[in-house]
Amino acid sequence: MNIPITITRLEEIYDNYDAFILDQWGVIHDGNKGYLNAIQCVEKLYSKKKILTIISNSSRKKEETIMRLPNLGFQSAHFHEVMTSGEMIWLSLKNKNNSEVKNLGKRCFHIYDQTKNEGEIFQKGLEKYIFVKNIEDADFILGCTPFFEKAVVDYIPLLNVAKEKDLLFVCANPDFESLEKKSNSLTFCMGTIAELYNSLGGKTFLLGKPSIEIYKKTFEELKNIKKSKILAIGDSLFHDIKGALNFGVDSLLITSTGIHNDFFDNENPSWKTSNNSLKKLGIKPTYVCKELFF
């Protein structure tokens, strides 16, 4: 594979593509507000008649994500499609259209942020399931957002019980970590807990990035676009870039505002000078850029 090309702005390459896949956190916003350059970039691409989509590993459902965009500084109408990992999992549980969930029992142990109404929103429409409070009573686990007062190791006792019961871990957010705006530090996501369960011998199920399924769903109505004319933009090698490789499209890694920012000299980001531990992963983007800037 060729060495990724460093660019300083999207204007250098945008005309090579007809459609763009954008990640959320670390690419277009920080969780609280949109990056000014990213907002302007989206507006510019839209004015150039480019097709814009968002593919996010957020555990939020699609409608909730779309409604939130204006508060972050973006116009929802600029995006042809928005798809989230949470929406994919919700649809799968509702319709039981995947072999992995077709024979699931009804009793679900749901992990979510209990300081918000996240659980109530996600469970709406899933009335066929019984949401239990004790892992001992569960037929499967649904993981959306970790309890923020807990550390990763705090989940081991729960996961050990789940493993003994041979429970499937349905993961609504496969991301390992995200950049927390308030502390400017990385915080773990549900994907880390799912990976821990895997390491203990447990079974997991996900439909978000890097799974090809979320890309197929997003481009159901855009099948006429050649993959050679699609560019995926993200900040995670494990999810955005690997997902783009799985789907067969070019990719752009954002370095300064995302989870790999410590691995690059962000005054002059370059794959050649990036941290060796990153190179050893064997996951290479097509391009590298400091930020989403037109």
Image: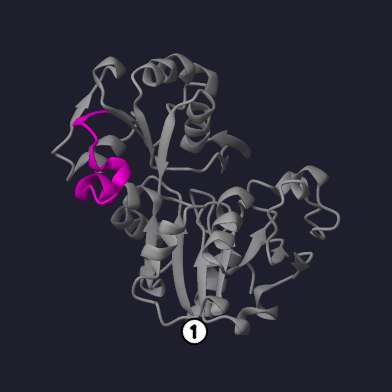
Residue type at mark 1: give it: Ser
Residue 139 higher or lower than 21, as above or below = above
For the N terminus, give its image quadrant.
Answer: bottom right
Instruction: Spot the residue most to the right.
Output: 273
Q: Position of residue 277 (x, y in %)?
A: 78, 42
For the C terminus, give its image quadrant.
Answer: bottom right
Q: Position of residue 246 (x, y in %)?
A: 55, 60
Q: Is residue 253 visible?
A: yes
* Closest to the observer, 180 or 110: 110
Residue behind mark 1: 47
Question: Callout 1: few (<14), some (14-19), or many (20+) C-alpha neighbours within 10 Å?
Answer: few
Q: Position of residue 113 (x, y in %)?
A: 37, 32
* In-image side of 68 versus 228 (left or right): left
Q: Position of residue 183 (x, y in %)?
A: 60, 35
- Residue for point 21% across, 47% down: 94
Per the image, is 106 magenta? yes
* Closest to the observer, 119 or 238: 238
Q: Is residue 35 visible?
A: no
Q: Secondary structure at mark 1?
A: helix
Per the image, is 262 magenta? no
* Closest to the observer, 90 or 81: 90
* In-image side of 255 versus 55 (left or right): right
Q: Which range is magenta?
A: 90-109
- Residue for point 53% across, 79% down: 45
* Closest to the observer, 263 or 243: 243
